[in-house]
Image: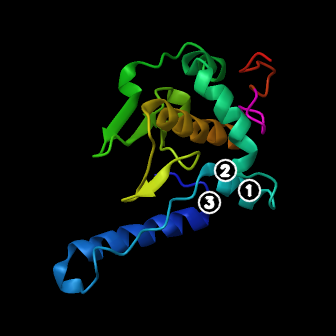
Amino acid sequence: CWYPTKSAAIVACKRVVLFSSQMNTNAGFSSSVPLPPPPSYAEAWNNSTGGHGTMDMYTGVFSKLKKADMQAIYNKIFPGNALPRTVWKTDRIMGGLVTTAFHSPAKEDAGGIYHPVEFGGTFTGGKWWYPDEKMAKTSAFIQFLLKCVRSGLVTGDLSGTTDGRPFFTK
């Protein structure tokens, strides 16, 4: 797995140890111990840029992205790559909440998997859950875009590619 920062990798390792300890009934851990939410790429970006970037700054992008064609945006980043329905792994829980994982199909992304974080979701059971599938997919896709910022493919404001192809019309 790739983690955006060393601290994100450490948190992930702690979560694995905590989870495996909870599975071992002799360990004396309560299964009700809440796991901390995973860091988003925006948090990692915020940490790596000295505080210049938060999830709040992407709220406008989230609203635009909910209405946008993610296939078209993906093609601007990785031309010639399609997004079949199989790239989305969706789960539902009682109460109708939804989460998803976006499995990027581009060879250039080396099999990246992106999970939704924040943006109106509720963190429960180690995952972010949303009232509808579109919100979950949009949040996961923003995590993908933020990774593309770190890779130098997308502008920091998530408005287009670094070579000038805009994602949204005004």
Instruction: Check disc 2 and report the residue beneath it.
Output: 42
Q: Is residue 88 left or right of residue 67?
A: left
Splitting the image into 4 quarters, where does residue 167 fall?
A: top right
Secondary structure beneath dot 1 equals: helix
What's the CA distance linking mark 2 and mark 3?
Answer: 11 Å
Instruction: Check disc 1 and report the residue beneath it.
Output: 46
Q: Is residue 44 left or right of residue 136?
A: right
Contact? badges 1 and 2 (CB < 8 Å): yes
Question: What's the amino acid at mark 1?
Answer: Asn
Instruction: Check disc 3 and report the residue beneath it.
Output: 5
Q: Residue at x 46, y 56 (%)?
A: 123
The answer to if 157 sits in the magenta stretch is: yes
Q: Is residue 24 left or right of residue 61?
A: left
Which region of the structure is painted magenta?
153-159
**Figure coloring:** rainbow
Residue 84's spot in the image, x, y percent?
A: 41, 18
Residue closest to the far front: 95
Q: Residue at x 55, y 12 (%)?
A: 80
Question: What's the amino acid at mark 3?
Answer: Thr
N-term mark: 1 or 3: 3
Splitting the image into 4 quarters, where does residue 125 fall?
A: bottom left
Q: Main secondary structure of the magenta part?
A: loop
The residue lying toward the viewer, choosing from 58 and 52, is 58
What's the CA distance linking mark 1 and mark 3?
Answer: 11 Å
Residue 36's spot in the image, x, y percent?
A: 48, 67
The residue lying toward the viewer, choosing from 13 and 30, is 30
